[in-house]
Image: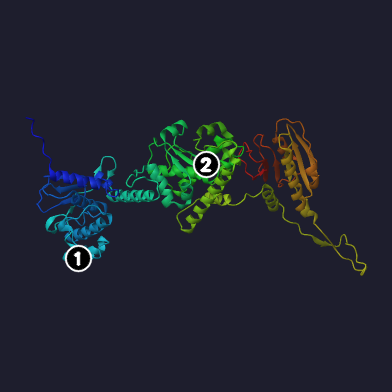
Amino acid sequence: MKGKQKQLNPAQEAFKAGYGMVRQNPALGSLLEWAEVHFNDSYPMSKEDWAWVASDGQIYANSHRRAAPQEWAYVLAHCLLHLALGHVREDRDGDPVWNAACDCVAVRYLADLHIGTAPGELANPLPPNTREEENLYRWLKEHRDPAYFRFSTMSGGRADMAWRGEARHWRIGVVDWQKIFAGSLRDALRAAVDYAGGVKTEPGTHQKKGRIQRAQEWFLSSYPLLGGVAAGFKLVDDPLAVQRMNIPVAAVSVHMREIYVNSAVKMTEQEWRFVLAHEYLHAALCHEQRLGKRDPELWNAACDYVINQWLRDMEVGTMPEGLLYDPELNGLSAESVYDLLAANMRKYRRMARHDILYGPPDWQGSKDYVDLDAWCRSAIQRGLDYHEAHGRGFLPSGLVEEIRALSQPPIPWDVKLARWFDERFEPLEKRRTYARLSRRQSATPDIPRPSYRYEDAAQAGRTFGVLLDTSGSMDRALLAAALGAVASYSAARDVNRVRVVFCDAAPYDQGYMEAADIAGSVRVQGRGGTVLQPGVELLEHAPDFPKEAPVLVITDCECDRLNLYGRDHAFLVPRGKSLPFPPKGPVFYLE
């Protein structure tokens, strides 16, 4: 005869079934993971008791109690809600009025969550005014209405919660029950919305969000400046895809509308916020479109320096170690930083993180590109408007200027050049003089009338120098446009004579020329390498060239570092070119 088969304990089986019901609940299941439930004789209880909970997450259930699984689910959920709602407090430990107020609030939550079935002795009608513990506690201290003292899971109205100190876990330290509950409610709500929208096939099949996903959703829910941009990009955290693409931390592809993240990198949620914001700004500020003919890796590094400075100033997350950051570059645009980095191109190209994945060469001319570009600019603009309207925090002025500039057409180079002329050559005023009379009117021939003329002293210093690269490497159409604009603006501002120096491998002094003759007098000479410094020396030491006269340099940037001796100056260079040295004066990009 076979040995006796071990008999099942019906009470324990019912308790396990109730435990499983709570474990599957999306709102309380996460809390049960951190709590420790005892269904044994570790704590003596009377036969009428159900369970009680301690602040360290220990829940003691009465193993001698016979109940249905739904009733055990209700009791366990009641104890977990005491933890989730912060009811177990050291300053209120053992206070029966506080315990009664918390029991009433927990019962109201259970009615809303529809978890289990209330046991017979706890299935009392809920009195009014049970929505907030503190208000109910103060009211009960005065009234002591017995109807509010019938919901404790311990018999005789005894307290069903006790303070034992904070719960600690070896992984996360102090267990924050309220934070865990808030995250569970957020996930449960998201799962319900996904299911209603057809994203999930079954309710309750939601996945717990990781640090990267929570960082992404923070932008959608709490940071309107970048929330619109974040909504338009798919987050790709597939380890195989990231490894195949050789992405160290993260990267953005505007033409694919995807953000790639390496989930194997161990970073906190705050650090992931910083990284994601970094990628969103690459897309929103159209850094790929603004590349032009620059070196892609060096341009990537220049944009990284600017973005990291802004994010530190805005305190968006925490900047991880090893990112490009230099406080001396604060306040500079990406184009200006690029010009500085170009002086040591080999060094900074090695430092680039390669987080801008440039699209195919021909994709920028497609309709999709135009739509994406307009969408990115619109998203960041709407985010800025909302951010400022609701006072959501500090934004660096450089970032605000770039966002505003993206929403408006760029100012043409010739308009900027006209402003440069306006700042340096104020309009002249004509004065009356009898030294040279005007024509006499036939009606009154005996009455002399003065003429209006410019004073010679005022016109004496109205000149500037033009240092022109004539090596032949500059596009003829751009060169003609630049010289035509210089001639027109000079004549319009009464600058009649301009000192012109043509530069190639050697300078060619053309002396003073009439402003109107500049556009038609350029001759390409030598076609050698451009050397501009001898032309600067020529102007600097010319006795007939005023020391305070500004200099306008027109070059294709294939030149060495220039020393302009502190003279007021500006550069006219083709779009996509960059000077091999940091310019101190303005740079107008011809196009």
Image location of residue 304, percent across then percent down: 51, 40
Q: Residues within 10 Å of mark 1 (few under 14, many from 20)?
A: few
* Above or below: residue 265 compared with residue 140: above
- Judging depth in this view, the residue of 162 and 439 nearest the camera is 162
Which of the image's four quarters has the C terminus?
Answer: top right
Determine the image quadrant of residue 235. Answer: top left
Tag 1 or tag 2, which sits nearer the N-term?
Answer: 1
* Above or below: residue 441 compared with residue 428: below
Q: Which mark is residue 176?
A: none
Mark 2 highlights which residue? 254
Amino acid on which the number 1 mark rests in the picture? Lys
Q: Is residue 344 visible?
A: yes
Q: Residue at x 57, y 33 (%)?
A: 345
Per the model, the C-alpha gap separating discs 2 and 1 is: 62 Å
Q: Residues within 10 Å of mark 2 (few under 14, many from 20)?
A: many
Relative to residue 335, is residue 169 drawn left or right? Answer: left
Image location of residue 199, percent across then percent down: 40, 46
- Judging depth in this view, the residue of 438 and 296 nearest the camera is 296
Q: Residue at x 61, y 41 (%)?
A: 365
Determine the image quadrant of residue 453. Answer: bottom right
Mark 2 and mark 1 residues within 8 Å of each other at the beta carbon: no
Relative to residue 272, is residue 254 drawn left or right? Answer: right
Image location of residue 519, percent across then percent down: 78, 43
- Judging depth in this view, the residue of 265 and 540 nearest the camera is 265
Residue projecting furthest to the left = 1
Mark 1 highlights which residue? 141
